[in-house]
Amino acid sequence: QLQLVESGGGLVQPGGSLRLSCAASGFTLDYYAIGWFRQAPGKEREGVSCISSSGSGINYGDSVKGRFTMSRDNAENTVYLQMNSLKPEDTAVYYCAARGRSCTSHIASYDYWGQGTQVTVSS
């Protein structure tokens, strides 16, 4: 069974940090681009970042540039999202998703999705 499982979410104060993990089971992440997306209550799902299968291409949404860093460890079959300087507007359910080798902002083109992990930024 092909699965992506996110972890690492939680409650953090503004200015704090969290590291999200996206672990794959049933398939190897090496051949896939992985995207992080988030969805806040009442809002559409939006792209946060994406890393190509080779790891050479990483894209970030404008709202997280300079604060979030995405990386992948193919040996661990896991992708990470390091989130620093968190703001209340970063509060959302965060999802990882996999598709072909290259990144795209077209959400519908991602084939596999995790169940999401809640990130809440609040004092």
Image: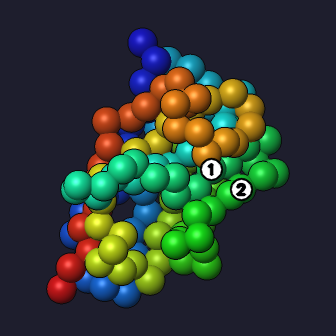
Q: Which mark is residue 30?
A: none
Question: Is residue 40 or residue 29 the one in the foreground?
Answer: 40
Which secondary structure lies at badge 1? strand
Residue 10, placed above or below residue 106: below
Q: Quadrant of the C terminus?
A: bottom left
What residue is rendered at 36% in x and 50% in y? 44
List the single residue furthest toward the top: 1
Residue 20, placed above or below residue 88: above
What residue is rendered at 43% in x and 31% in y? 113
| Three-letter code for the amino acid on which mark 1 is drawn | Cys
Q: Quadrant of the N terminus?
A: top left
Please name the residue that numbered disc 2 is placed on: 58
Tell me whether circle 1 and circle 2 mark residues in contact (CB < 8 Å).
Answer: yes
Distance from the alpha carbon under mark 1 to that under mark 2? 6 Å
| Residue 37, position as x, y percentages in the image | 46, 50
| Residue 18, position as x, y percentages in the image | 39, 69
Asked which colour scheme the image uses, the reply is: rainbow
Please name the residue that numbered disc 1 is placed on: 50
| Three-letter code for the amino acid on which mark 2 is drawn | Ile
Q: Residues within 10 Å of mark 1 (few under 14, many from 20)?
A: many
Residue 94 in view here: no
Which secondary structure lies at badge 2? strand
Ranked by sequence position, the earlier of labels 1 and 2 is: 1
| Residue 117, position as x, y percentages in the image | 30, 49
What residue is rendered at 68% in x and 58% in y? 59
- Image-based side of 107 in relation to 1, left or right: right
What residue is rendered at 52% in x and 72% in y? 63
